[in-house]
Each structure stands twice: as C-alpha cells, then as structure tokens.
Image: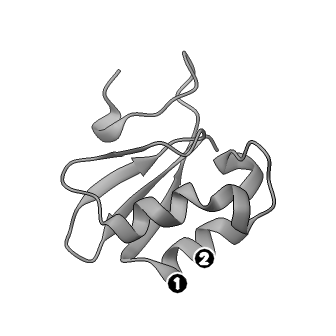
Amino acid sequence: MVSVSFVDSRGVRGVIHNDLTIEADGPVDEELRVFVRSASTNYRQDSPTLEALTPEFLIDLYVHTAVRKVEPIPDDGADGNCRLGGEE
C-alpha cells in the first residue's frame, strides 16, 4: 500500500500519499491537515511515510478527524503515487 483514499464528513474525497501529502476534490478540513502534519511527532518518526505509520495511523485518522471512510489504494506502479480518480 502506498496511498489511502478517504471521504470526510462533508463528502470531500481525497488521497493521502505515502509522503503524507493530501490531494482532494474539495477543501480539506484544517483538522485533517494538522493531524497528518503532526504524524512525525505523534508517531515518533523522523521522516514518516504512510506505509511506516499504518495501521495505527489509519485508525487514529478515522477516530480523531472528520474522515469517515479510509481505504488502502494499491501501488499503481510508475512513480509510486496514486492519484485522485486514478489519473496518471
């Protein structure tokens, strides 16, 4: 797994990439941005990646933010990044 898709309580769909960048089809809740940014502190990782943080991170993401659905996205190959809507 390199990325996860999410849907928040407002229906905004997005992807959190392995490098913890967020891509979404609408405005991302600030609470989610702060939670993802704080991953290195909260999970005691110097250079955190999504792969290193899961599954604990995914559970906390659901519990502590407006995210209401989280699903792993398999690696799509090429550059190791999955894109929203499966775009290349």
In the image, residue 63 lies at what x, y percent?
52, 84
Question: What's the distance in space between the residues labelled 2 and 1, CA to CA?
Answer: 5 Å
User: Residue at position x 50%, y 82% from top?
Assistant: 64
Say which amino acid is labelled 2: Asp
Q: Quadrant of residue 8?
A: bottom left
**Nearer the observer, 36 or 85:** 36
Q: Can residue 54 be seen in this view?
A: no
Q: Is residue 62 left or right of residue 56?
A: left
In the image, residue 25 lies at what x, y percent?
21, 48
Q: Where 88 falls versus 62 (above or below)? A: above
Do the residues bearing badges 2 and 1 touch, measured as CB atoms within 8 Å?
yes
- What residue is pinned by disc 1? 63
In the image, residue 59 lies at what x, y percent?
61, 75
- What residue is pinned by disc 2? 60
Q: In this view, does 72 lie to the left or right of 26?
A: right
Q: Can residue 15 be seen in this view?
A: yes
